[in-house]
Amino acid sequence: MLALIAGQGDLPRAVAKAAPEPVLVCALAHALPDRVEPDLVFRLERLGGFLRALRRRGVTRICMCGRVTRPALSLRALDLPTLRLLPRVVRALRRGDDGALRIVIGILEGAGFQVLGAHEAAPDLLPPAGILTAAQPGPEAAALALLGDRVSAAQGRADLGQAAVLRGGRVAAQEDDAGTDAMLARLAPGQGGLLYKAPKPGQDRRADLPVIGPATVAGSARAGLDGLVIEAGGVMVLDRDRVLRDLDAAGMYLWVRERGA
């Protein structure tokens, strides 16, 4: 049986809908999902007991998906099974995003669960490589995409965001903890350029794989961008049919591209 540890945003609902089997939707009490109804809610201080409860329900696989903010940890609220995990939980809370996720995945695997990425639980969310829209990238797009590769590598080394806006041969905006849509909303409208989005090089793709959806298209259109470039096999597309319709209506392109191509 598959359990989703669901955060906020559209991804948990998309994974639950696209998964080939029924899923048990779980959520941290401090970060309840806003698109799906959880079957089971737990606190970080009860993580050990929560994992035992999953085993009793027959869960063998876990997928983490959606935005989750870091909770405060109350030592007085710890249960005994979580007390044994405390050193690793504290290390995770002190690390950057990638380091924290690696520790959490290690805890889940150490408890006997197989950890799946959202793209593994719902593989149809990954689009095929190529240009999927009627509009085609212009001559500037290839050079900007190569710039995006370099920016992505630098953001990965600094454990920063997964997206950037590139215009006129330079970086116009970079994603921070607020996310891609917030970055686009802050961007002054202009003309031309592209949104580049890809996983951080070397990140564990079983958690925090990038996503685009209709809101990303709307924000990119408001910013006056020509299109979107996403890494093939590394960025999920939510509501793909609508995304492509909206891009075609706006005369924008979607280029699903191998890094370095």
Image (cartoon, rainbow, N blue to C red):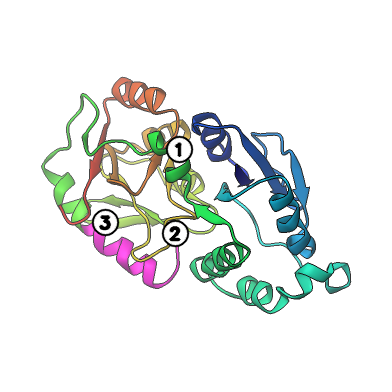
Secondary element at tag 1: loop
Crowd band around label 3 with a 10 angstrom C-alpha radius: few (<14), some (14–19), many (20+): many
- SS under mark 2: loop
Earlier sequence position, callout 1 versus callout 2 = 1
The secondary structure type at the circle numbered 3 is helix
> Mostly what secondary structure, the magenta segment?
helix
Which residue appears at 31% of the width and 38% of the height? 225
Q: Is residue 196 left or right of residue 215?
A: left
> In this rendering, would 142 be left or right of 107?
left
Q: Amino acid at mark 2?
A: Gly
Residue 122 disc label: 1
Q: Point out the image quarter for the N terminus.
A: top right
For image coordinates 53% across by 55% down, the residue present is 114
**Pointer 3 or 2: first along the chain:** 3
Q: Nearer the viewer, residue 208 or 61?
A: 61
According to the picture, the residue beneath numbered tag 3 turns out to be 148
Q: Which residues are magenta?
A: 147-161
First-in-chain label (3 vs 1): 1
- The one nearer the camera, 155 or 38, is 38
Q: Which residue is mark 2?
A: 161
Q: In the displayed orientation, state which residue is furthest to the bottom.
A: 87
